[in-house]
């Protein structure tokens, strides 16, 4: 059976920043593309885990991108 729940896709990724004051990555080839998740809750859990794993590196940052807002920009979620 196919799950008919609305998909609100979220991308989790991270990388080392050049400066702490801006989002500019040191090396785009080294970005950690963690994955795409079906909802914010799932993405948040993975984001939190990755952030905790890299807490000793002040320049490492992970982000959640709300892909569903790019796929359907006119739709409210």
Image (tube, rainbow, N blue to C red):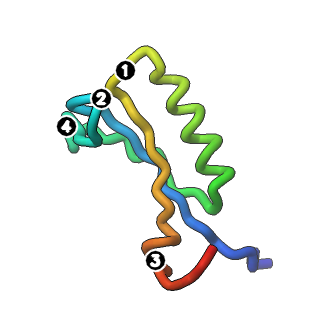
Residue at which label 3 appears? 71
Query: Circles 2 and 1: CB distance less than 8 Å?
Result: yes
Residue at 68% across, 51% down = 41
State how far apart marks 1 and 4 are (Cα). 16 Å
Q: Depth-wise, is mark 1 or mark 4 nearer the camera?
A: 1
Query: Circles 3 and 4: CB distance less than 8 Å?
Result: no
Q: How many marks?
A: 4
**Labelled disc at residue 45:** none
Q: Is residue 49 above or below residue 53?
A: below
Q: Depth-wise, is mark 1 or mark 3 nearer the camera?
A: 1
Q: Depth-wise, is mark 4 or mark 2 nearer the camera?
A: 2
47 vs 33, left or right, is right
Q: Residue 64: image x %, image y %?
A: 49, 50
**Picture quadrant where residue 58 is located:** top left
Dot 3 surroundings within 10 Å: few (below 14), some, or many (20 or more)?
A: few
Residue at which label 1 appears? 58
Q: If the image is split into quadrants, where does the C terminus sit?
A: bottom right
Of callouts 1 and 3, the N-terminal one: 1
State how far apart marks 2 and 1 are (Cα). 8 Å
**Labelled disc at residue 27:** 4
61 vs 18, left or right, is right
């Amino acid at each position: 059976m196919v799950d008919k729940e609305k998909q609100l896709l979220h991308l989790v990724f991270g990388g080392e920043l050049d400066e702490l004051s801006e989002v500019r990555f040191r090396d785009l080839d080294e970005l950690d593309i963690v994955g795409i998740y079906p909802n914010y809750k799932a993405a948040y859990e993975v984001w939190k885990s990755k952030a905790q794993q890299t807490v000793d590196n002040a320049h490492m940052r992970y982000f959640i991108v709300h892909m569903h807002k790019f796929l359907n920009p006119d739709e409210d979620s």
